[in-house]
Image: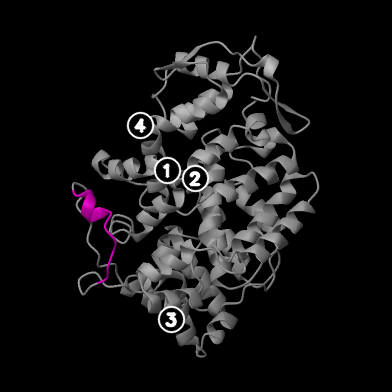
Amino acid sequence: MTVQTEKPNAADPALAWKRYEPDDRRPWNLALAGHLYRRAGFGGDWSQLQAALADGPQRTIDKLLQPPDDLATFNRDCDAYAASTGGDVAALRPWWLRRMIGTPQPLLEKMTLFWHGYFAAAGSTVKDARLMRDHVKLLRHHALGDFGAMLQSVSRDPAVLVSLEAGASRKALPNENFARSLMDVFALGPDQATAADVREAARAFTGRFVFGGQFREIPREHDSGTKRVLGRVGNFSGDDVVRIVLDHVATPRSVVRRLYRLLICETDEPDVALIDPLAETFAKNYDVLKLVETLLRSNLFFSATAYRRRIKSPVEFAVGIVRAMEGMVPTVRLAEDLAGLGQNLYHPPTVHGWAGGRHWINRATLPRRHNLALALLQGAPPYGDKLDPQAVAQKHGHETPEAAARFLLDLLLQGDVEPAVRDSLLKTAGGLRRVAYAVVTLPEFHLA
């Protein structure tokens, strides 16, 4: 099964961002349904893929965008579990993995993970589970909402400020760390602001402190003098500076490019002409949901430009296996294994988050990814028999070994392998667990 959609001309943004409508030349099929669930979540289970085939792309996207009826109950149960983890940041990791595996709204969790890397508050610096738990909860609240409101909230988030070593900024000694990250990482992007802009913006953020894990503003420590920031002059506060960077033309372009990399393609840099229409619309109200919707519904998303053009992160790789197998595994162990693969949740390695892309796979991590896949699927310690390919195949009506093996190819790769590879996989000895392992260690499965 191959993707027949054409690559829209990058010089024609109107065609690229127009809604994809299946036709005889560009049919809706299982491969594209799997592509949608990989990008808008962590991969689909068989029932989701079959529903998507029946519903078509646009109705399936409707379901992914809208909160399900049982989301409030799910959130309440997850929050209660997270609150019981105490003061250890490491104890939060298995809770979040359980949430990713079980969530009825995978797009929301995928976007929360994206913003976690985007703002990159590091538990190794914060060293407070409550602050990190509240930080990720803040990201989840805004993940598909107003980027401007999220940026204002982040500017007051104790976890972000402590992580950036910006928990104290006095009038006599402005702390430049948050202002620099705001401009270079969170909003404008690199090389858009001068050192003078950062210094002046830091003056606007004076009077902001984190005491005992609580954000506080002390008016007497705020510099009330005139500042010049990005060509604007005034007696600016920190909130004013956030609004100024949101008004700058570079900010919507920077955010759109980051989301393009997540949802469309991380291997090729998009043309300015392709980005600008989305950035202009995004700048009007910074509606993340609307931007994500435009990307997911587009011709470009369902084209060869986007298909398998991202390398899965360790979390995407592992959670995708577990969700496809419709099970749950010991997530304390899984969190440790994922940290060993380079994605230690709550601990982004730098202020830029995880580098991603080709950095996920090298001579050390690829064998470890395969070892993790084997551990998950082998039916023995350390993960036990929580994932059972045979049971999943039988549940969906595939009883014979050959039918079950074909089912696993469709479930995990949507049948999108070369005929010779397919024939070889169907002859894999050792039962369905070995077939499943062989499939998830193919290069194609490492690509989103």
Magenta span of residues? 12-22
Residue 169 sits in quarter: top right
Q: Amino acid at mark 4?
A: Val
Establish if 185 lies above or below 62.
above
For marks 3 and 2, the one nearer the N-term is 2
The reply to whether residue 238 is in sight is yes
Q: Amino acid at mark 1?
A: Asn
Instruction: Pick the residue in front: 32 or 446.
Output: 32
* Residue occupied by mark 4: 249
Q: How many numbered discs?
A: 4
Question: Which residue appears at 57% of the width and 38% of the height?
Answer: 120
Instruction: Pick the residue in front: 426 or 49.
Output: 49
For marks 1 and 4, the one nearer the N-term is 4
The stretch drawn in magenta includes residue 192? no
Query: What separation in Å lies between label 1 and label 3 (alpha carbons)?
Result: 47 Å
Quarter the N terminus occupies: bottom left
Which numbered disc covers residue 146? 2
Q: Amino acid at mark 3?
A: Arg
Residue count near mark 2 (Cα–Cα under 10 Å), binned few <14, some 14–19, many ≥20: some
The reply to whether residue 441 is in sight is no
Of circles 3 and 2, which is in front?
A: 2
Query: What separation in Å lies between label 1 and label 4 (alpha carbons)?
Result: 13 Å
Question: Which residue appears at 39% of the width and 76% of the height?
Answer: 55
For marks 1 and 3, the one nearer the N-term is 1
Query: What separation in Å lies between label 3 and label 2 (alpha carbons)?
Result: 44 Å
* Residue occupied by mark 3: 406
